[in-house]
Amino acid sequence: MREIPAQLSMTQKEIIEALRRKIDFTKEEIDIFFDKIEHQSYAKNAYLTKPGDLNPPFMLIKSGCLMTYFKDLNDHIHAIQFGQEMWWTGDLDAFFNGKPSKYGIKALTDVEVYLFKREIFELINNSSTLFERYFRQLFQNALISHQNRIIRNISFTAEEKYLEFIRLHPRLELIVPQKYIASYMGITPEFLSKLKKQIAKS
């Protein structure tokens, strides 16, 4: 049995270093950032947001693993995204346009997050052109990642999707339940189990 890795938790200093690897923020800008955002902790299996919620936050993961999911009319859960330390997540359509959230966000481990309400997000961006640039780059990279995932979904075999998943997210395979990984890939858990056995034999 493969060992499940210990949960990582980023210190505030490590988060600042990660932010500054993207943009050279001043101390004053960093101070405003941490003064305005809200820190929260959630236990494993807690729901940070649910479909239909109004004014859902945009969030930065400090520690743990989150799953963004969509629930269809038959109450089937479809995994949309997994997030780890220093990842951003949230329903951007609901966040920016004031719509009820289409998605829910569930804690797959104990988690710590920084929450951004819309007015705080706007305040931080209006107070700093560097944060405005940071978030523009963040959303550009998210769009590129989304487009690459579409290409994988329409052109990769199930085996190629799985191998790419564990290449990009090696820790997630040991944290995320197999049923959610299968959902993310668009296959059944049973098929994923058979696929993993075939790969292990090859």
Image (cartoon, rainbow, N blue to C red):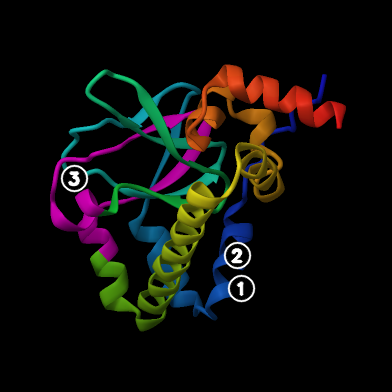
Spatial CA distance of label 1 from label 3 is 30 Å
In percent of width and height, residue 180 lies at 51, 27
Which residue is under mark 3? 55
Examine the image and state in which quarter residue 97 appears: bottom left
Q: Is label 2 in a helix, a strand or a loop?
A: helix
Which residue is under mark 2? 18
Residue drawn at (72%, 27%) of the image: 196
Magenta residue span = 93-121
Local packing at callout 3 (Cα closer than 10 Å; few below 14, some 14-19, many 20+) is: some
Q: Is label 1 in a helix, a strand or a loop?
A: helix
Q: Amino acid at mark 3?
A: Asn
Examine the image and state in which quarter residue 64 appears: top right
Local packing at callout 2 (Cα closer than 10 Å; few below 14, some 14-19, many 20+) is: few
Q: Is label 3 in a helix, a strand or a loop?
A: loop
Which residue is under mark 1? 21
Does 92 lie within the magenta span? Answer: no
**Left or right: 64 as drawn, with respect to 118:** right
Residue drawn at (56%, 20%) of the image: 189
Q: Are marks 2 and 1 in contact (CB under 8 Å)?
A: yes
Q: Are marks 3 and 2 in contact (CB under 8 Å)?
A: no
Query: 50 and 119: which one is in front?
Result: 50
- Placement of 131 over or under 147, stated as above or below: below
Residue drawn at (38%, 73%) of the image: 136
Q: Amino acid at mark 1?
A: Arg
In the displayed image of the protein, which residue is found farthest to the right?
A: 202
In percent of width and height, residue 111 lies at 51, 34
- Placement of 60 over or under 123, stated as above or below: above
Quadrant assignment for the N terminus: top right
Spatial CA distance of label 3 from label 2 is 27 Å
Quadrant assignment for the C terminus: top right
